[in-house]
Amino acid sequence: MSIQIERLYPSQTTHRDRLLRAAVQLFRHEPNLLEAFSYDPRGLEDDAALLAHVLAGCIPPGGGRQVVFAAARDVFSHDERAFEDAVSDIYATANKDLDPGGEIATLHFANGLHVLLSYRVCRSLHRAKRISLALAVKGHTGRAFGCDIRPEAEFGRGLWFDHGLGIVIGQTAVIEDDVSIWHGVTLGSNFRGREGKRHPTVKRGAVIGAGASILGDITIGEGAVVAAGAVVTKDVPAGQTAAGVPAQLKSRSPHSFSGFSLGPGDHP
């Protein structure tokens, strides 16, 4: 079944093929990837098509996969911002994962990156007022990845979701550039109100450890660290660490999460 999605944007962005050329080399070295990913990079036009095939390949066969592919293909072809943000996530993930295969291996094998690709598509659809389609794509990818990220949430560029499993992010959450988030993280509401800003803001270069819960309209400061399993309900100042249940503040070690965030003395 071929599903056509009405185009969202009036003009095509400039075609790019750097990642696509790398994909051709990757598949040439391991021919079984053709069957594993159910597409042949030699038949694709550009990097936008490549991103769409990789994301859709995460969805079980059927109409849902076709919908995700068509939506992702259109978004990455016509929304310059969504495409550039996705590429910045690929580079950030390859760098932080220390993937010996570089960006193209990261694109195909990093689960957390696939979660981010899904968000970029859903966010673009939501900005274009295609709310129902955004939620449909979110539903399919959320079930595939075991996460729930609202398309209204605002993300910066160059993000890294390690593993990507179990991440829950609410409607009014804001994540700035260069943030690193491990699995099982919740950016949720404290249920003190249903109007206005009610989810956290995570500032540039912060790190959120596995299983942390950050609740309410609070701010995690630039370069701050939230330790694994922490429950945070108050602001965390820039460069500080929050750990425990409930979370307590302490100074951040100079070597804490080196390479993953802004450390003490670092500047944007």
Image (tube, grey):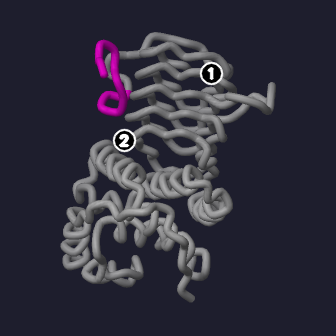
Number of the label disc, if any, that sits on residue 158: 2
Position of residue 216 in the picture relative to residue 179 (left or right): right
The CA span between labels 2 and 1 is 22 Å
Residue at coordinates 27% horizontally, 53% vertically from top-left? 99
The answer to whether residue 162 of the structure is visible from this angle is yes
Q: Position of residue 106 (x, y in %)?
A: 33, 57
- Residue 66 as seen in the image, left or right of residue 262: right
Q: Amino acid at mark 2?
A: Gly
Residue 197: quarter of image: top right
Q: Which residue is mark 1?
A: 218
Specify few, some or many for label 2: CA neighbours under 10 Å numbering under 14, 14-19, or 20 or more.
Answer: many
Q: Is residue 109 above or below residue 36?
A: above
Q: How many marks?
A: 2
Range shown magenta: 257-268
Q: Amino acid at mark 1?
A: Ile
In the image, residue 57 above or below residue 181? below
Residue 240 among magenta residues: no
- Assess whether mark 1 and mark 2 are in contact (beta carbons under 8 angstroms): no
Q: Is residue 211 above or below residue 244?
A: below
Q: Quadrant of residue 249?
A: top right
